[in-house]
Image (cartoon, helix red, strand yellow):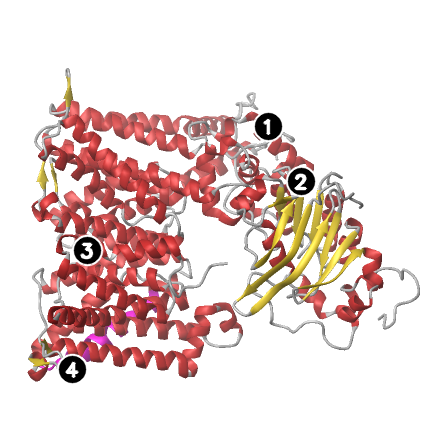
Amino acid sequence: MTAGPAQPAALEADHLCRRFRGVTAVADVSLRVAAGARFGIIGPNGAGKTTLFNLLSGELRPTTGSVALFGRDITALRTYRRAALGLGRTFQITRIFSDLTVLENLTLALHGLSRSKLSLLRPWRSYRAKMAEAADLAASFGLARRLAAPASDLSHGEVRELEVLLALALKPRVLLLDEPAAGLSPAERIDIQALLTSLPAELTLVMIEHDIDVLRGVVDSAAVLHLGSLVVQGSMRDIQNDDRVRELYLGGARAHAPGTTPPGESPSPAASPSEARPPETSPPSEASPPPGPASPGAG
Amino acid sequence: MTAGGQAPAGRASAGRAPAVEIPPAGPGSPAGRGTRLALTALRGSRRFGGPVAAVAVGIVLLMLLQGNGFASTLVLNMLVYAIAAMSLDFLGGYAGLISLGQAGFLGVGAYGVAIAEVHFFSPWAAVGIGLGATLALGLALGIVAVRVRGVSFVIITLAMGQVLWGLAFQWVGLSEGDNGIPLTILPSIGPFDLNDPLTLRMTVLAVFAVVALLLVTIVHSPFGLSLRGVRSNETRMAALGYRTGLHCYLAWVIAVFFTGVAGVLYIFVNQLISPATMAFSQDGLLVIMVVLGGLRSIWGPALGAVVIVLFQQELSIYLNRWQTVMGLTLIAVVLFSPGGLWGLVRAAGRRRDALIARLEARPGKRGGP
Amino acid sequence: MQQFIAQTLNGLTLAGIIFLVSSGFTLVFGVMRVTNLSHGAVYLLGGYIGYSVITATHNFLYGLAAAALGMGLFGLLMERTLITWLKCNEMSELLATLGLIYVIDDVSLAIWGGSPLTINLPGVLGASSTLPISGIVYPNDRIFILAVSIVIALGLYYLLRRTRIGAIIRAGVDDREMVSALGINVRLVFSLVFTLGALLAGFAGVLGGTVLGVYTGGDSDILLFALAVVIIGGLGSFEGAIVGSLIIGLIETYGTAYFPAVAYSILFIPVIVILLVKPEGLLGKVNR
């Protein structure tokens, strides 16, 4: 978790700010994720998490602020350029190619950073190495027998796996995961968590997630966002013990106003039921065994 | 799921099922023999049906092209519009960029040749100018056109096509307006003389075959797959490292160029170009050809072109209201059979695959399900 | 100078007609995500119907009413059948309306023939008057059209901005699912908007028939204008339709007056500029 000053952070956001016609979705967020780190982004709905991801991966331009990847300023770069530099991303509402087969999905991903994507006269099925790689990728996540199936035939859990596979196919150095466990059954959540912990150690992970169990098994530090601003950033233990976080999730004033979801951030379908029952799932200190003295107001 | 036969576990089964070897003979009962016969026939049709149909169509075309003037002109026009329709399918069906302005580019190709000859360029130079003008226009307009998608793209291409038609209509100094420009001399080099009817017919057929095969090849290439990806989920493509704007631009240029080729052939075949060829109704007819034939199939739109050109020439003789029939046909296809004629062919193919799977699963065959 | 003022007024008149057509088109797209390519044909058919009724009854207002109500009814029928059957599939709806153009055009050709027709305004409206300040003699029918267009534009603006149904329509443009979630009968709103659009187009067809004539191909011409307007103004934006209509109407008129050879293509210039600079239109929304 330590990166010496000589080594650039894998991903760095510097005073990122994004305004939409009067709504400030992300307000002065600065983050520093070290190489190889497992970093989480937490916060209630409408906190600006997906908007932040959109700023990091290039779907949105910041109003002010900058983003750097391994020390290189990528703020002005479009999404495809960031992908070429090693930044991968999955989407909260899955974006797979549903009218194509799983094999075609993976093939597209595998050609994405290669010159062969502009090849006009050679059938894509003739690229033996890439076909084998696609088969291996699918097999590593248990999708080997689904290669010929149209992606629309996949179960929700398989779709989420394919979503991660597509990002991994690019061999990214930094991977942004937007709620990889959203909408999954408890059994599927275990699978996803196993998948995430099996990812290579050199890969830097930044993950938005509401499910505290998935989070705790994967990340070692996190940042908490609220209404677009960074509340606290640090190790999971620090966050669990932080007063502001407690107040956010347990405190008297309701942390967020419903319906103020800024454009670009869609409410996560899985998060909504969990947000409606905050004492059970949201704050870090609730679901875990008490780290120290019993937290006040535990319910 | 689909395809007959199970792929051995661990091997990536890519799309179409691999040809399955015919299992050893089961018990010699009449039912067993009948099933084996049926299976052989069905599997044979799956493997050889396509090539056999292609050869049959080729023979029919060759025969028609030997015949008297009228039949062959009809077939030639079918081939010319088939080229334009296939190009439109490439752009609209695969990349999702449905253009309602392709008749404009067909006209530019034809007018380029005609105007060049009026200005005393040699026939081959005129061809170069026709193709060059279409390509240049495509390169320039593409920069603007691919900045939008979906409905906006349809609208902007419609506008482009109409503006090109308007130019042909109003810029009388260049285009002779409504009268159109006739073409008298076709290119020739040595013994190869397009003024000879037979040579012209064979050339058009050859160009059609080349364009069709090229488009089919491109569609199966990684670039072709990328176009389907852009159509399916453009944001994901960008996240995967694709410059989607560039891919759309390339698809546009390819489609426009081949439509220009169709334009050059058009004026060779019909020896006249007038603004009517570029009117909005012609843009619409091209779309009808593609949708009727079947989006995303390349061959389907060629078939659609055959049907529509036939309707246009033949039906209009017996039926004054053939345009109404055109419109109703499009509506009917959209409502009841969105996959078009080729969709019906594909559906038949799927039923055959299911039948093969059922027959193979019968006892006495390969050990059952 | 006098010529320029006259041309400007011509441009504004054209802008008025174009606005009546494009406002319906853009609202239908905004609320229902339907690209009704047959909108131009509805305009033309309205012109034909108006012509027949006026010729038969010698009453301009009857003609206007017949065209507007007739096309409104046509629009309602179209929405309840074709659009409903296609269940929100954007491309299919577009293609179906494309097919409808052929049907409407051909039937019109069968009934009214291919020769251009003109609608004449009765009495004083058919004459000309001298305008104050500049002293130009200007046809009253154009003044009438301009006045009617402005009144309707104001009326629509009031409807959209000040009434409850208008708020629902604007909300529907913004977020269709939310409107439905609020318990509002979205089906009814769809029918209403579509019918209103067709009604406006039919009405415009009669007005246009006075100064532009009713002729085969008139639907493509007006459709092209309307499409240019929505590209410039932004698909779904009512205010964009106003701005776009003014731009297109004036440019088209000046172009025809001063650069006749390329007049048709001149309206392409603002379209290209917008596509290069702000592809979603001047007042359109970005799809992010």
Q: What residue does disc 4 label?
A: C61
Q: Nearer the viewer, mark 2 or mark 1?
A: 2
Image mark 2: chain: A
Q: Nearer the viewer, residue C262 or B44?
A: C262
Residue A26 picture quarter: bottom right
Which corner quadrant of the image does residue B328 belong to?
Answer: bottom left
Residue type at tag 2: Arg
Q: Could you classify mark 1 by the number of other residues whose Cα lies within 10 Å: few (under 14), some (14-19), or many (20 or more)?
A: some
Residue type at mark 3: give it: Tyr
Identify the residue position indicated by label 1 in the image.
Answer: B366
Mark 1 touching mark 3, by CB under 8 A?
Answer: no
- Residue with the mark numbered 3: C264
Residue A172 percent across, percent down from the top left: 64, 40
Label 4 or label 1, whichever lies nearer to me, is 4
Extent of the magenta region: C57-81
Q: Quadrant of the C terminus of chain B?
A: top right
| Eye-nearest disc, 4 or 3 | 3
Helix, strand or loop for disc 3: helix
Q: Nearer the viewer, residue C214 or A190?
A: C214
**Which chain is disc 1 placed on?**
B
Marks 4 and 3, how far apart in space? Answer: 32 Å
Q: Residue flagged by tag 1: what amino acid is it?
A: Arg
* CB contact under 8 Å: marks 4 and 2: no
Residue bearing mark 2: A173
- Residue drawn at x 34%, y 26% is B52
Relative placement, left or right, of A245 versus C149 is right
Question: Which residue shows up at 77% across the image and 50% down it?
Answer: A219
The main secondary structure of the magenta stretch is helix
Nearer the camera: disc 4 or disc 2: 2
